Structure formats: structure tokens, C-alpha cells
Image (cartoon, rainbow, N blue to C red):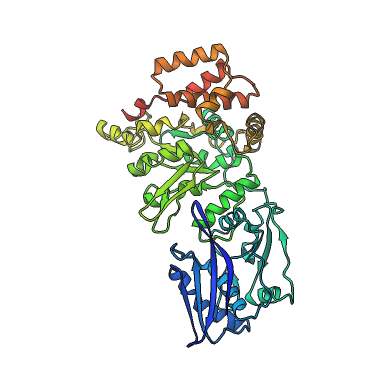
Amino acid sequence: MSATVQSILDAGNQAITIDVECHLSNGLPSVVIVGFAGKAVDESKERIRGSFASSKLALPKKRITVNLAPADIPKDSTSFDLPIAVAILLASDQIKEPLSKHILFVGELGLDGSIRAIRGIVGKLLAGRKKGFTTFYVPADNTSQAMLVPGLTIVPVKNMRALYLDLTKTVALKQYQSGAYKPDSETVFTQDFKDVVGQARSKRALEIAAAGGHNVLMNGPPGTGKSMLAKALPSILPPMDPEEVLEVTQLHSLASREYEQTVTTRPFRSPHHSASGVSIIGGGQHPRPGEVSLAHRGILMFDEFPEFNRSTIEALRQPLEDKIITITRARDNITFPANFILVATCNPCPCGYYGTAKQCSCLPHEIGKYHRKLSGPIIDRIDLYVDVDEVKHRSLLRGQQEEPSQLIQRRVLRARSRQLKRYQDPLKQNASLDNREVKKFASLTADAEELLNQAAERLNISARSYMRIVKVARTIADLADEPRIDIAHISEALQYRRPPMELIK
């Protein structure tokens, strides 16, 4: 007797349908799993024994052979527990009616018969939908994530006994049509721009960054509020739309320990400078997203930017330019999205007080070495450079009125709505335009283009920096509700452009 149940293998960029075949034969009672199964899959036979006993289901006293086809592709996921269990029930005639070819099972079994949440459920559902599956039996704890993928019939399952009763047409499980899940958009932020005294120019730069998705580098002595400004940036970003929630939830499900959670707020990732390159870029024996991908659709903050390892800093070139990160290993080649706003901070020198009223203790070669860790190509990929000045002590406790994040966010939302109307793409921002799109949508006045060309010649600006200045000017014009880029917009964009050699001298 034999039976076949469908499951899915979501391996990075590839989605492969897995036929879980079960065959019963005479011999000593045992469960044998073949088909290039990893340790986690091979151990499923023990989980199945415990689950069947706890669910009062009969495990056939025969030799049970399970094959995961195609057998030449490695498989290492606990999500195969559920389809293997269903295949055994079918092969032993405990489920008599054949299952539809459009049904897919994923889930991990507990020894008590429960069905546990699995990692990367969103990717598996997207892959299954692409392969033509319409009905998915998923762990109940993964329901909120599963509901994010539109166009599917989701059947949440809490335990093996309930699944058995449903498949035998005894007690039907409740089914849901996905796409109806509405994440809560109300978020309480720990930092607000009204809490930051002064720093009007820095706040303006961050407003531009939020409106157009631009990268920012803030330079200033310690204690001036650089980190505080960066942590307040999420409070002025637009809330995520359903497609962004889907992308971010999938990435965090692949890497986070709380992989059953739905991520509804924009990520804010701030790795320490001692973090390894793999943890920031991604990778490992079984490649998983790093910090650059976990910050997708959110903010990646690099506090004390020059303190990071040089190789880690240089690895940011691809995500800053292409909004993706490609991890290449001997056995795997996986591309993860990495579309984030980089907010980096740095000090004028290693001690932090060069050029301030306090005495600097650094030697000239130490200052040069400190800034040379930020290469020209990296600085070239940062749109906004802003100096964060020291704040007068008398103003700190006066309680002067600062503009709250709520008002700034309204301007950002209006600028984003203009971009949506222009590009007809909710995920397209000014910072992500390619050169062809910049030429099509920039719309500079003759005077503004002449000013930009003169500045580019005088400041020896690279071609990449030239186009980035236009993108920043486009965002400034959007904030001002202007259809064309004028001299004032180009002038302000040029103020945020620091020649690379000034940083790496």
C-alpha cells in the first residue's frame, strides 16, 4: 500500500514541489525516511510516533518507507512532519478518500499531538501558490502570517487529532480566505523629534530621507544627539502597506527566533560595530538573512560607522546600490532583498573632539586612518551628509517647543503620495530610481540644470553623485509641492553633498 502527499521546499529563490511518498510493506515495524533527508527530517519519525500515540491514531505495525522526491535535493526542515504523517494515514487506509492535488500540508509535530509553528511560512505559501496550490493546511500559530498571502484557502490546524477528523469528513476544520488580515497600524515610538532640542538642519535632512528613502550620514562630536535623531526617524516614516508587511514578515520569519510573529512596524536594526560580517550581511551554513535584509523596508543604523570592520562596510556597496544582497556559497547562491534607509553616524576623529571647543587628543595620522575606513565608493552612495552641532546647555531644560514627529510625518506622507501618483508604484521612491527613470521624471528647470552642472564641475562630483543630487532635489521639490525641480531645490540638495576627499583625507 502506498500514498503521496504534496509539500513544498522553499530554498531561497527556488520553489520545489516535494512529493511525500509513503509505502507500507511486511517486515519488522520501523519508519525509514529516504530522499536526501537532513537531521531534522530524519528525526521526524520519533515525533510522528509520539504524535500518533497522543492523538489516539494507529501507527501501522509494518515497515514504513517514506520517500521525499525529488531525492537528489537536500531537505532539512521540520515542515515535512505533517505531510509525512498524512501520507502514513492515507497509506494505511485510515483516511479513505483521496486528497485533492491542490492541497498542500506544512507543519511540525509535537510529541503531544500538537502542530507547531514553522519557520518561513510566508515563503512556502508564496511558492505553493506559484505552483498552483490553492488550499494550505498550516499550524494555527502561523495563521496571522498565512493570512497575509492573498488568494489562498487557509486551514489552521492545532493538533493531529483535529486534522484526522477533518480529513475523514467527521468534524470539518474552519477555513479562511487569505488577504483579509488587517495589521494594527497604531505604533507607540520611544523617540519623538519634539524631544530633540535644536538641530534644525539635521531634522530637515532626516525629513528628506524619510520622504524619498535616502541614506544619511551624520557627523558630529559625542553627545550632540546623533543617535537620538536616528532613533526618532521611524516616528516620521509612513506605516507599511500589506505588501511590505508580507515581505518583512517573511524575512524575519527566516532569521528570527520568534518566527511565528507578524511584523507590522518598519524595522529598525542597529547592530554593534563588533558584530560579525555574516550577522550583518547574512550567510551561514544554511544561508539566512543578515541585518541588511532584516532592515528591509525600514532603517539600518550604523552608530560609529568608521568603527565597523572595513570588509563589512565595503560589503554594503551592493545593497546600497541595487537594494539586494547576494550570498554565494559553495552549495548555495541566494539573493535576499535589502531595501533600507542607511542612517550612519561618525565622530570628527577617534576621540570625537576634533574641531570643537574641547581639546583633541588624536594625532593627525590617527584622524586620517579613522576616516579612511569610509572609502570614496561608500561615501558616494550616501545621499545626505549633515553636521550635527553641539547644543547650548541653557536651551536643554527650557522646554522650548519643538516640532513633533506627527507634523513632520504628515509632510512626509504628502511627499510619498506625490511619488505614488508619479510612479504608479507604492514601493517606488525617489531614491530607488534608476538613471533612465531620473531622466524621465526629474523635470529640472533650465536654471536649475545650469546650477547643477556648474557645481558638478567645481566640486568634481562623480556621475553617481550627480544623479543622487537630482534624486534628493526631486524629494525636496515633492516636500514643497512643486512639480519641477528649481534652483532652490538644487541648492539645498548640494548643501547636503560633502566631497568624498573631505572625509577620507
Picture residue at 56% right of the left edge, 31% below the top: 430
Considering the image in quadrants, where does the N terminus appear? bottom right
Looking at the image, which is closer to me, 488 or 435? 435
Q: Is residue 186 above or below residue 134?
A: above
Considering the image in quadrants, where does the C terminus appear? top left
Picture residue at 74% right of the left edge, 75% below the top: 171
Q: Quadrant of residue 313?
A: top left
Q: Quadrant of residue 314?
A: top left
Left or right of 249: which side holds 305?
A: left
Horizontal and vertical percent for residue 279? Answer: 41, 52
Horizontal and vertical percent for residue 392? Answer: 49, 31
Left or right of 179: which side holds 53?
A: left
Q: Quadrant of residue 154?
A: bottom right
User: Can residue 117 be seen here?
Assistant: no
Horizontal and vertical percent for residue 10? Answer: 52, 57
Horizontal and vertical percent for residue 26? Answer: 51, 86
Picture residue at 52% right of the left edge, 83% below the top: 25
Picture residue at 56% right of the left edge, 55% below the top: 123
Q: Is residue 96 above or below residue 357?
A: below
User: Can residue 373 be seen here?
Assistant: yes
Looking at the image, which is closer to me, 303 or 331? 331
Left or right of 276: which side holds 25?
A: right
Q: Is residue 392 above or below residue 245?
A: above
Looking at the image, which is closer to me, 153 or 26? 26
- Total numbered labels: 0
